[in-house]
Image: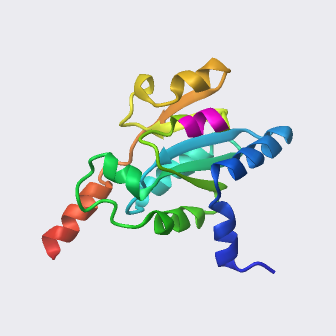
């Protein structure tokens, strides 16, 4: 019998493995939802957002920015706070997350083009017209959705609170 830790690791897969899963799921008629982000300090806002994203289909795939990719996003010298492997394990531990795949590019466009999700989701701080991969997903009839953010929760605000109390 697989341990819980082994089951977490089974959800953290390469792009090639994710593509195989997507083919299988689509064959079974399942709707694939994709989102991406850094998810550095996992908080209630992330969980609410990811839960709502998962509700838009049958399978949720998360494209996780690698450590290198997070640094290129100019989120500050202290970011990421947690390593990509730590962030991936935390996301994989969420029961409604099916796959976590790490990408190193500046944007997830090639990941989205490889997976061809039925639904592409981003947080409400992204205008749909500016969501990377939106045109691609719409080109084959997929949908692009923006989920409102939960106010009062952000990794930056948590980081600032920690610095204030240090």
Please tell me which residue is depicted at 53% across the width and 63% down the height of the picture.
Answer: 88
Residue in view at x 38 percent, y 48 percent? 150
Q: Residue furthest top?
A: 139
For residue 75, above or below residue 131:
below
**Image spot of residue 26 (x, y percent):** 79, 39
The residue lying toward the viewer, choosing from 3 and 112, is 112
Residues drawn in magenta: 110-114
The stretch drawn in magenta includes residue 113:
yes
Q: Which residue lies furthest to the right in this view?
A: 28
Residue 137 among magenta residues: no
Q: Is residue 20 left or right of residue 65?
A: right
The image shows residue 119, relative to residue 157, as above or below, that is above
Percent x, y for residue 8?
Answer: 64, 69
161 sits left or right of 67 in the view: left
Task: Give the residue drawn at x 62%, y 45%.
Answer: 55
Where residue 141 sits, quadrant-wise, is top right
Residue 54 x %, y %: 61, 47
- Of residues 160 and 47, which is closer to you in this image? 160
Locate the C terminus and report the quarter of the image it occupies. Answer: bottom left
Query: In the visual, does 46 lie left or right of 71?
Result: right
Overall secondary structure of the magenta stretch?
A: helix
**For this view, does 141 lie left or right of residue 162?**
right
Along the viewing direction, whichever of 115 and 31 lies nearer the viewer:
115
Residue drawn 42% across the image and 39% down it:
148
User: Which quarter shows the N terminus?
Assistant: bottom right
């Amino acid at each position: 019998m697989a341990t819980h830790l082994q089951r977490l690791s089974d959800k953290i897969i390469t792009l090639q493995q994710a593509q195989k899963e997507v083919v299988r799921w689509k064959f079974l008629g399942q709707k694939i939802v994709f989102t991406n982000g850094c998810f550095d300090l996992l908080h209630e806002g992330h969980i609410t957002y990811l839960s709502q994203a998962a509700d838009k289909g049958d399978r949720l795939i998360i494209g996780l920015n690698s450590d290198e990719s997070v640094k290129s996003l100019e989120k500050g010298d202290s970011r990421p706070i947690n390593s990509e492997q730590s962030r991936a394990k935390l996301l994989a531990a969420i029961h409604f997350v099916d796959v976590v795949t790490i990408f190193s590019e500046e944007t997830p466009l090639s990941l989205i083009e490889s997976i061809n999700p039925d639904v592409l989701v981003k947080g409400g701080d992204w205008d749909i017209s500016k969501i990377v991969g939106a045109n691609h997903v719409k080109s084959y009839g997929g949908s692009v959705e923006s989920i409102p953010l939960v106010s009062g929760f952000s990794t930056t605000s948590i980081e600032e609170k920690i610095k204030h109390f240090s």
